Image: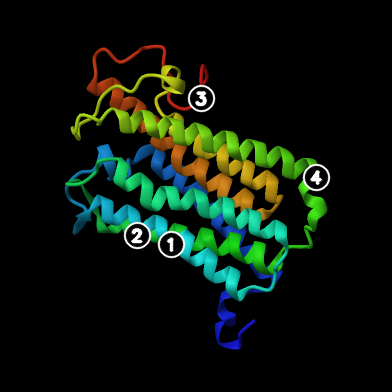
């Protein structure tokens, strides 16, 4: 590795300590978000300082994982073929989130607090670093045999199921604005008939699959953070729908069909 860029890399013991601290921060975030709605999207409100166009904010936040992971790939020492599969899965997800989703979501004209953008940049930076350092520097030798390991197979299937749920649910939401409107409507079809936020459920499933497929502390950390961030957001969305629409289906749950 290049000496001048050595600050990107740490010992395995320091890495584990940082990961555990990051998990604790994720749990603290869960507790905070249960009582406090992050002020963006339908929950955006005044009093949060400078705001920028929401589309710009999303592109900035979600581009970091694509660029930063590729930088770590170039600087890291691991060049196993299996690692590039993980890189491709990660990059595919974030290309969709960074460049496809902001365009199709019809959020032009909507604003986002700059503070939320900074928090998103911080999370994506740390999360990408944790996963990138594991994959391209600290990881043990997966080898091609890992492709036949039950953990990889199960994890890959779970990841793809989650991605499919996430993308299909987003497409249903996009279709609500096919008429050019930018307001909110009751989504119907797919898992929306059972829960208010199948797009969030899909993302939680997706990164749980990542954790299983990589069988790593980094993957587990990401899955935990995803759940800590999106579960309370789903509950807030569910309450918002019920408050906003008198005809909102009573039998829908927030995040998990029949349960939550």
Residue at (19, 59) in percent of width and height = 50
Rendering coords of residue 31 (x, y %) = 45, 42
- CB under 8 Å between discs 1 and 3: no
Tell me the CA gap for discs 1 and 2.
7 Å
Question: Is 197 on the left-hand or right-hand side of 116?
Answer: right
Q: Report the mark closest to the observer, 2 or 3.
A: 2
Rendering coords of residue 234 (x, y %) = 41, 32
Write down the quadrant of residue 51 in the picture: bottom left
Tell me the CA gap for discs 3 and 4.
29 Å
Q: Nearer the viewer, residue 6 or 82?
A: 82
For disc 4, the marked residue is 149
Secondary structure of the residue carrying numbered label 4: loop
Secondary structure of the residue carrying numbered label 1: helix
Residue at (63, 36) in percent of width and height = 158
Tell me the CA gap for discs 4 and 1.
31 Å
For disc 2, the marked residue is 60
- CB under 8 Å between discs 1 and 2: yes
Q: Report the mark closest to the observer, 3 or 4.
A: 4
Give me the disc on residue 64.
1
Tell me the CA gap for discs 2 and 4.
36 Å
**Tag 4 or tag 3, which sits nearer the N-term?**
4
**Tag 3 or tag 1, which sits nearer the N-term?**
1
Secondary structure of the residue carrying numbered label 3: loop
**Tag 4 or tag 2, which sits nearer the N-term?**
2
Rendering coords of residue 94 (x, y %) = 46, 52
Q: Nearer the viewer, residue 24 or 9?
A: 9
For disc 3, the marked residue is 256
Question: Is 11 on the left-hand or right-hand side of 27?
Answer: right
Secondary structure of the residue carrying numbered label 2: helix
């Amino acid at each position: 590795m290049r000496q001048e860029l050595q600050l990107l890399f740490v010992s395995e013991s320091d890495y584990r300590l940082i990961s555990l601290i990051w998990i604790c921060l994720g749990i603290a975030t869960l507790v905070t978000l249960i009582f406090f709605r992050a002020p963006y999207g339908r929950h955006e409100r005044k009093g949060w300082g400078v705001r920028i166009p929401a589309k710009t904010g999303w592109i900035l936040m979600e581009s970091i994982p694509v660029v930063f992971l590729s930088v770590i790939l170039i600087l890291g020492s691991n060049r196993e073929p299996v690692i590039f599969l993980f890189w491709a899965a990660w990059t595919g997800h974030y290309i969709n989130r960074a460049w496809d989703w902001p365009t199709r979501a019809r959020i032009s004209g909507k604003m986002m607090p700059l503070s939320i953008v900074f928090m998103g940049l911080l999370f994506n930076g740390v999360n990408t670093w944790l996963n990138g350092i594991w994959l391209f520097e600290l990881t043990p030798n997966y080898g091609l045999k890992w492709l036949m390991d039950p953990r990889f197979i199960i994890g890959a299937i779970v990841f793809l199921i989650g991605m499919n749920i996430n993308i299909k649910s987003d497409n249903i939401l996009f279709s609500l604005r096919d008429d050019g409107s930018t307001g909110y409507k009751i989504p119907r079809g797919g898992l929306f008939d059972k829960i208010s936020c199948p797009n969030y459920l899909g993302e939680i499933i997706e990164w749980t699959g990542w954790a299983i497929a990589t069988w790593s502390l980094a993957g587990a950390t990401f899955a935990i953070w995803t759940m800590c961030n999106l579960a309370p957001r789903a509950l807030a969305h569910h309450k918002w729908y019920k408050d906003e629409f008198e005809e909102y289906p009573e039998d829908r749950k927030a995040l998990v069909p029949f349960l939550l």
